[in-house]
Image (cartoon, rainbow, N blue to C red):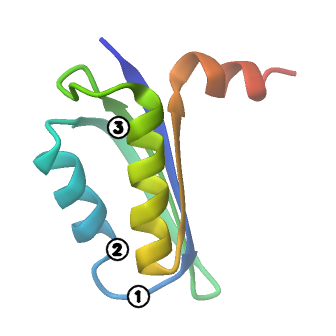
Amino acid sequence: MKRTIITVVGKDTVGIIAKVCTFLADNNINILDISQTIVGGYFNMMMVTDASGYPEPAAKLADEMEALGQEMGLSIRCMHEDIFNSMHRI
């Protein structure tokens, strides 16, 4: 399993979850866990996904997610679970 962590942050608008989830489904990426909240009009979502079905390198997925975020006026970051864990280790 190729677990990736995806974070989405930005001003709340209609359709954020739909657009991100449609992109993932279109690219054969399964959502394993998801959490989202809206605080003071700002949207924050974190997903744990299985990108095993995505045939391209992880860097391409990260670039495509970032481009989707720019298109939507959001910050979308995607990284392998091991890298995410290393970055957030105390």
According to the picture, the residue beneath numbered tag 2 turns out to be 16
Quarter of the figure that contains the N terminus: top left
Q: Position of residue 45 (x, y in %)?
A: 48, 58
Which of the two discs, 3 and 2, sits closer to the camera? 2
* Rendered position, 6 above or below 52: below
State left or right for residue 44 relative to residue 4.
right
Quadrant housing residue 88: top right
Q: Which residue is mark 1?
A: 13
Dot 3 corresponds to which residue? 33
Left or right: residue 80 compared with residue 50: right
Q: Amino acid at mark 2?
A: Ile
* Residue farthest along the right direction in this orientation: 90
Amino acid residing under circle 3: Asp
- Image location of residue 21, percent across then percent down: 23, 57
The residue drawn where x is 29% and y is 26% is 50
Horizontal and vertical percent position of residue 40:
65, 86
- Which is nearer the N-term, disc 3 or disc 2? 2
SS type, badge 1: loop
- Residue at point 17% right, 42% down? 27
Amino acid at dot 1: Thr
Determine whether label 2 and label 1 are within 8 Å by CB: yes
In the picture as drawn, the residue positioned furthest to the top comes out as 1
Q: Which of these two is toward me, 60 or 81? A: 60
Taking the spot 38% from the left edge, 40% from the top edge, the residue there is: 61
Q: CA distance from mark 1 to mark 3?
A: 22 Å
Q: Residues within 10 Å of mark 1 (few under 14, many from 20)?
A: few
Reply above or below: 4 against 16: above
CA distance for labels 2 and 1: 6 Å
Which element is circle 2 on?
helix
